[in-house]
Image (spheres, helix red, strand yellow):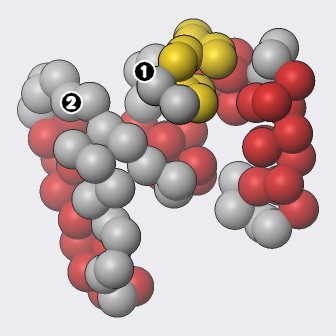
Amino acid sequence: MDEITSALDPVLVNEVLSIVRDLKSDGMTMVLATHEMGFATQVADEVCFLESGDILERGSAQEVLHNPQDPKTQEFLRRVHQAGRL
């Protein structure tokens, strides 16, 4: 699913994210593209950072989001932290 929360108001965003959490707890495997880093941290078993279709970094959410190795991933996450989104 690609950016399933884009263009939704905050109430609908929360509903959609809740449904995804429920599906995960039911054992469903999903591939999601999202800029919701906090949500990704909560529900992802594995994350990938992509640039122009290439994987820059891949690993557990904890590894990649809190200890990125790729300089572009580091810079992106620095900006996410500055914006208070993670």
32 lies above or below 30: below
Q: Residue at x 36, y 70 (%)?
A: 6
Give SS at disc 1.
Answer: loop
Residue topped by disc 2: 30
Q: Is residue 69 left or right of residue 24?
A: right
Q: Secondary structure at mark 2?
A: loop
Q: CA distance from mark 2 to mark 1?
A: 10 Å
Q: Is residue 9 something that shows in the picture?
A: yes
Vertically, is 85 above or below 49? below
Between residue 3 and residue 24, name the one nearer to us.
Answer: 3
Q: Please tell me which residue is depicted at 87% across the width and 39% down the height of the picture.
A: 75
> Against 54, is 81 above or below?
below
Quadrant of the snapshot with the N terminus: top left
- 6 w.r.t. 63: above or below: below
- Residue shown at 82% from the left, 14% from the top: 69
Q: Amino acid at mark 2?
A: Met
In this rendering, position of residue 28 left or right of residue 73? left
> Residue at coordinates 87% horizontally, 24% vertically from top-left?
71
Q: Camera-side residue: 56 or 40?
A: 56
Q: Could you tell me the amino acid type at mark 1?
A: Asp
- The local crowd at label 1, few if under 14, some if 14 to 19, many if 20 or more residues have their Cα within 10 Å, is few
Counting residues from the start of the chain, the first of labels 2 and 1 encountered is: 2
Name the disc covering residue 45, or none: 1
Question: Where's residue 53, x and y in %?
Answer: 46, 25
Mark 2 Cα-neighbour bin, 10 Å: few <14, some 14–19, many ≥20? few
Q: Position of residue 78 (x, y in %)?
A: 88, 46
Q: Quadrant of residue 12?
A: bottom left
